[in-house]
Amino acid sequence: MFEKVTAARRRLEGQAHLTPVMTSATLDGRVGANVFCKCENFQRIGAFKFRGAFNAVSCLPEEDRQKGVITFSSGNHAQAVALVGRLMNIPVTVVMPEDAPATKREATKGYGAEVILYDPGKASRDELARGLQEERGGILIPPYDHPDIIAGQGTATLELHEQAGPLDMLLVPCGGGGLLSGSAVAAHGVMPGCRVVGIEPELADDATRSFRTGILHRVDNPRTIADGTRTPSLGEHTFPLVREYVSDMQTVSEEAIMAAVRFLFYRMKLVVEPSGALGVAALLSKAVQPEGRVGVLLSGGNIDGPTMTRILSAATGDG
C-alpha cells in the first residue's frame, strides 16, 4: 500500500498545493511538545480531500471517466470531486445531506457538479448513490473507502515528513478513516517509529470502538459539530488498515473541539473547521499525552459564517 501512496504523490505534483507547516510557541508551551501543524485548510477546495479525489479519478481508464463520476459526501469530498471533474471535463453528480454546511453545498455546485440533496434521517446516501449509478451508469468514487482515495490522502503525511523531519507522534482526524489509514501507511513507510493516533468526536466514536474491540461499530447521524466525521463507520478497506497501522484512537468532547477552533483562530490566525481541529483539541484537552515532536493534520478549513460565529461567541477564555 505504501507504493500506492508514493505513486499518488507523483500524480499530485503540480496539481495539489504544497500546504505549509505552521508552529506556535504558545501551543508548544501549553502541551509540552514541539507541534507541527500541516495546514490542509490551505489545500485546493480548502481540505485534504482534493488529494484522494484527484488520485482516484486519475487512475480511471479514459473510457470510464467519460461515463461521469458519482459520489456521496457531506461536503469536502463533494467539492473535491466536483473540482476534479471540472479540471478533467468529467460530469459529476453528488449526493449530499440536506444539513450539509451551506458553504460546502454552494461550492460543490459552483464547481459544476449536479447536487442531489437527501434527508439523512430517512435515506442512506450509499444506497441513493448506488441507485444513481445503476440508473446513469457512472463510476462511483466513494469518499474514503477506496484504495486510490486512501493513497491520495496519505500524501499529506509524506509532505509533512519532508517539511518537518521525523516525528514521534502524528495526530489525525478520523471520519471514515481514509485520511487516517493513508496517513498511517505513509508514516509507517517513512518514519516507522512514529505513533499514529486517530482522533474522533465523543459523539461519533465508532472508529475508536471498532479499533479497540476488533469489531466494526456504527454511529448513525451523530450530532457532532465536526460534520466531516459524521460517517457511520470505517469501511472494508480502511478498517483493516487502521487496525494494522494506527497505534491508538482517542475521542474529544464538543467543547474541546470548539476550544481548538478558537485557539487556532485567535492564536495561530488559522480558519480551521471543527473536523480539522480534532488533533489540536486532543492536545489542548489532554486527551492525548504528546511525545517529543508531534505532527498534527489540520484537515480542512471549510466552515460557514454562522457556525464560526457560534463557536467564537462561546469563547470562555481558551483562545
Image (spheres, rainbow, N blue to C red):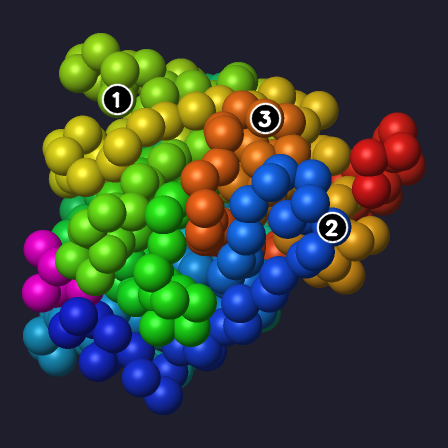
10 Å crowding of disc 2: few (<14), some (14-19), many (20+): few
160 to 225, vertically: above or below:
below
Name the residue nearer the viewer: 275 or 29: 29
Type of the residue with mark 3: Lys
Q: CA distance from mark 3 to mark 1?
A: 20 Å
Q: Which amino acid, by three-letter code, is at mark 2?
A: Thr
Give how far apart the Cα atoms at labels 3 and 2 are: 15 Å
Q: Residues within 10 Å of mark 1 (few under 14, many from 20)?
A: many
Label 1 and label 2: CA atoms lie apart by 32 Å
Work out which quarter of the rendered image holds the N terminus and state it.
bottom left
Range of residues picked out in magenta:
1-5
- Quadrant into which the C terminus falls: top right
Decide if residue 227 is on the left or right side of residue 248.
right
- Magenta region includes residue 2: yes
**Can see residue 72?**
no
Which callout, 3 or 1, points to the residue nearer the camera? 3
What label sits on residue 211 in the rendered view? 1
Residue 236 image offset from top left, x and y in percent: 15, 33
Q: How many marks?
A: 3
